Image (cartoon, rainbow, N blue to C red):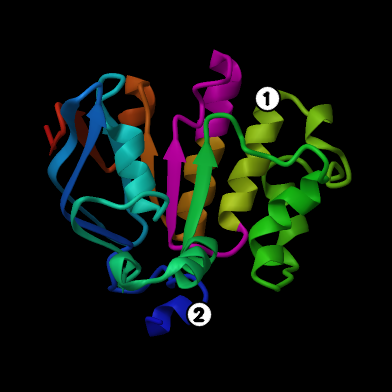
Amino acid sequence: MHPAAEGGGTSAGSSVPALELDGISKRYQQGGDDVVVLNDATLHMAPGEFVSLVGPSGSGKSTLLHIAGGLDKPDTGRVQVAGIDLSTLGAGPLAQVRRRHIGFVFQFFQLLPTLSVRENVELPLIFDGKTSHRVDELLERIGLAGKGDRLPGELSGGEMQRVAIARSLVAGAPLILADEPTGNLDAVNAAEVLDLLTEQVRLAGAALLLVTHDAAAASRADRVFTLTDGHLSAP
């Protein structure tokens, strides 16, 4: 195992890139046709950097995010998170890297309905055999103090996404991947959640890669990349 896979998240002051995607290509077979989803995509992110990824539906944005998070493998190219080459890891060590070094925020929250708010936030730590005093601190920071014992079904959509944000941050991961995190929310909640996400990620010193269709959300980033026909480019 890469030594970094054994520890916690990379510190905000680290010089190690939070994410390195080099020459990433991915294709699928669809109805007998060879569909190129990603074509030699390259993206490097520094610790604490906020990058947004935009492009039309079906352009491969979520695929790129899943590859960056070790949820999918590229056909060619290299993926490194906090200096760890994901291609060198077996299933167990790769899962450990995802728990410790990568935080995920999805459009549909991905909360477990039978677990309390507190338990959902704690999940990355529970799977890693750890505990943390940061859970209640995070709940207070995201405006859910006193709601730790509630079930997700008792919360609004905006509140559930806040829980997902806290879960992504609880392990101190150096890289946060957000896939359309406001896409399932009304305009007011979307703005509040995006404010909270960017504020808390900045506070944590983590890098944020945000996939979004929202031009206003994308414009908040330090850099904006566009994915079109498998090609990744900066304006």
Picture residue at 72% right of the left edge, 69% below the top: 132
Q: Is residue 210 above or below residue 219?
A: below
Image quadrant of residue 81? bottom left
User: Which quadrant of the figure contains the N terminus?
Assistant: bottom left
**Quadrant hosting residue 127:** bottom right
**Residues drawn in magenta:** 170-194
Quarter of the image for residue 84 reads bottom left
- Residue 61: give its label: none
Image check: 47 left or right of 21? right
Extreme residue toward the top, this view: 186
- Please say if 12 is above or below 203: below
- Within 10 Å of disc 1 (Cα), the crowding (few <14, some 14-19, many 20+) is some
**Which residue is identified by label 2?**
7
Q: Amino acid at mark 2?
A: Gly
Q: Nearer the viewer, residue 75 or 217?
A: 75
Q: At which x and y percent is residue 149?
A: 88, 45
Q: CA distance from mark 1 to mark 2?
A: 33 Å
Earlier-in-chain disc, 1 versus 2: 2
Q: Is residue 80 magenta?
A: no
Q: How many marks?
A: 2
Residue 176 covered by magenta stretch: yes
Mark identifier at residue 157: 1
Q: Is residue 50 above or below residue 28?
A: below
Q: Residue at x 79, y 51 (%)?
A: 118
- Is residue 220 at least partly visible in the picture? no
Local secondary structure at mark 2: loop
Q: Position of residue 41 (x, y in %)?
A: 15, 45
Q: Amino acid at mark 1?
A: Gly
